[in-house]
Image (tube, grey):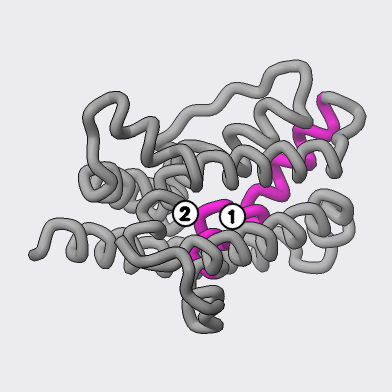
């Protein structure tokens, strides 16, 4: 694993930001967010963003220790993560529904902050990224993404009108292809194939 006391690297920050942007897929989730807002009447954007940010940062730092407690190494988790990312990407590109999600009554924390924003795919991706990039660059990527998530949650209706349904579908498919490539890279780097 790389040392965490290195300087900030713009290339790594851009890479981690794009990977997290694709995996969080907040633009693709706009229809889901609108539906949750319709059901609940109101979404606390600040609370959802802060809780998701906290969960991601916490997992970035203690996720590896949690794995050690259950006897797993980061490389094995990264390989498993590459499969999760692969299936999420397939959902995005092909319009399939592989992962089923429920929509309970309270929506700001569950299911919005967790698992919609900071879900299994995001957590897996964070640990996978940790095998490739310096922690401080991943942190910057998390913060940049969560600022964008907050902006999207605050302006969901405007963005839906701006992009339209077909625009959101195009974005979702484009980031799905990026995620497929990321999944393949993670798999190759952690298996040595």
Can residue 132 be seen by looking at this rendering? Answer: yes
Look at the numbered discs 1 and 2 and tell me whether their residues touch, using CB distance below 8 Å: yes
Residue drawn where x is 40% and y is 49% of the image = 127
Would residue 117 be found to the left or right of residue 22 on screen? right
Q: Quadrant of the C terminus?
A: bottom left
Q: Residues within 10 Å of mark 1 (few under 14, many from 20)?
A: many
Asked whether 136 or 15 is in front, the reply is 136
Can residue 172 be seen by looking at this rendering? Answer: no
**Residue 58 in the image: x percent, y percent?**
57, 40
The residue wearing badge 1 is: 25
**Residue 63 in the image: x percent, y percent?**
43, 38
Residue drawn where x is 68% and y is 36% of the image = 113
Q: Residues within 10 Å of mark 2 (few under 14, many from 20)?
A: many
Asked whether 89 or 69 is in front, the reply is 69
The residue wearing badge 2 is: 92
Give SS at disc 1. Answer: loop
Query: In 3D space, how far apart are the residues under numbered discs 1 and 2 (Cα atoms)?
Result: 9 Å
> Does 107 lie within the magenta span?
no
Extreme residue in the bottom direction: 10
- Going from the N terminus, do you reach mark 1 or mark 2 first? 1
The stretch of residues the image draws in magenta is: 18-39
Q: Is residue 112 above or below residue 144?
A: above
Q: Is residue 82 above or below residue 43?
A: below
**Residue 54 in the image: x percent, y percent?**
67, 41
**Residue 74 in the image: x percent, y percent?**
28, 46
Would residue 156 be found to the left or right of residue 80 on screen? right
Q: Quadrant of residue 67?
A: top left
Q: Quadrant of residue 168?
A: bottom right
């Amino acid at each position: 694993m790389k040392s965490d006391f290195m300087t900030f690297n713009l290339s790594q920050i851009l890479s981690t930001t794009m990977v997290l942007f694709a995996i969080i897929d907040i633009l693709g989730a706009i229809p889901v967010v609108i539906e949750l807002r319709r059901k609940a009447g109101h979404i606390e954007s600040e609370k959802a963003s802060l809780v998701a940010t906290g969960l991601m940062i916490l997992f970035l730092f203690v996720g590896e220790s949690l794995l050690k407690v259950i006897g797993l190494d980061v490389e094995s988790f990264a390989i498993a993560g590459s499969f999760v990312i692969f299936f999420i990407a397939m959902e995005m590109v092909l319009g399939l529904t592989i992962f089923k999600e429920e929509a309970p009554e309270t929506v700001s924390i569950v299911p919005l902050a967790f698992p919609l924003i900071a879900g299994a795919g995001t957590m897996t991706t964070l640990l996978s990224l940790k095998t490739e990039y310096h922690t401080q660059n991943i942190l910057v990527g998390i913060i940049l993404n969560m600022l964008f998530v907050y902006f999207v949650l605050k302006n969901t209706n405007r963005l839906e009108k701006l992009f339209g349904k077909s625009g959101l579908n195009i974005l979702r498919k484009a980031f799905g292809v990026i995620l497929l490539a990321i999944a393949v890279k993670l798999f190759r780097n952690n298996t040595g194939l």
